[in-house]
Amino acid sequence: EDGHTESSSGAPLLMPHEETLIVAFYASKIPSLIGPLAQVPRLRRDIQVAATAAMLFRRFFLSNSVMVYDPKAIMVAASFLASKSEEAMVDVRYLEEGTKKMDAPVPKEEIIPAELALAKGVDFDLLCFHPRQAVLAFTEDLISFLKSERGQALATFREEANRIVKGPDLKPMHDEARKMV
C-alpha cells in the first residue's frame, strides 16, 4: 500500500506532502503571470504584487485543499486580488490572456468566483507584510559596511585578491562585525 486513502467516491486522495508540492508548483508560476517578469506586458507590475499574490495563494491553501479548489483558478484569482490590494489593478481579460500564454487557460468566468472563494478563504485579510524592505535595508547596510575601512579589512582575501564575497565568507564577517557593535 502507498499510504493513500480513498474518498467516498473511491477516488484516491492526495497525501499532505503531495498537496504541498502542488501549491508550491502553482505559487512558482505567479511571477510569470503577474509581476516584472510577466509574459503579457500589461501584467508587468512591481514584484510586490507577485509577492502578495503568492502569499494570498499560500495562505488560502493553509486551510483549504487542492482537492476542493482548483489551484490554477485560485492562482489567477490571487494575482487579480493582489493587483487590487497593492493598488496596481489589472484587467481580468489580461489575466485570462496570461494563462493562455502559460498553456494553462483559465477563463474570466472562473476568475471572479475563484476570487470570492479566495477572499473568503483568507478571511478577507488581504494585508500582507513582506520581508523585502527589511532585506533591502540590510543589504544596503552591508554594502555600506563593506565600503568602509573596517568592512574592507574583513572582506580582504589573501588567496584571491579580487573575488566576490561568497556565502561561507559571511559567517566570520558577521562574527567580527558583531564584536564591533
Image (spheres, rainbow, N blue to C red):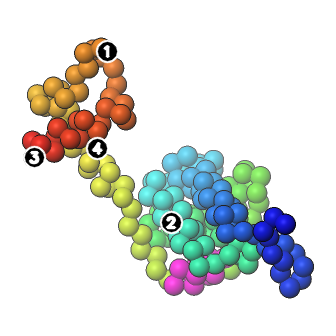
Kindly identify the residue that appears in the image at 90 percent across and 79 percent down: 10
Calculate the distance from the C-alpha at mark 1 to the C-alpha at mark 2.
41 Å
Calculate the distance from the C-alpha at mark 4 to the C-alpha at mark 1.
23 Å
Select label 4 or label 1 by which is in front.
Answer: 1
The residue beneath circle 4 is 139
Farthest residue, direction right? 10
Calculate the distance from the C-alpha at mark 3 to the C-alpha at mark 4.
17 Å
Query: As shown in the figure, which amino acid type bears the numbered disc 4?
Result: Thr
Residue situated in front as seen by the camera: 39 or 50? 50
Up-down relation of residue 100 to residue 92 (above or below): above
What predominant SS class does the magenta segment belong to?
helix
Query: As shown in the figure, which amino acid type bears the numbered disc 1?
Result: Glu
Contact flag, marks 4 and 1 (Cβ < 8 Å): no
**First of labels 1, 2 by sequence position:** 2
The residue beneath circle 1 is 160
Calculate the distance from the C-alpha at mark 3 to the C-alpha at mark 2.
35 Å
Circle 2 residues within 10 Å: few <14, some 14–19, many ≥20: some
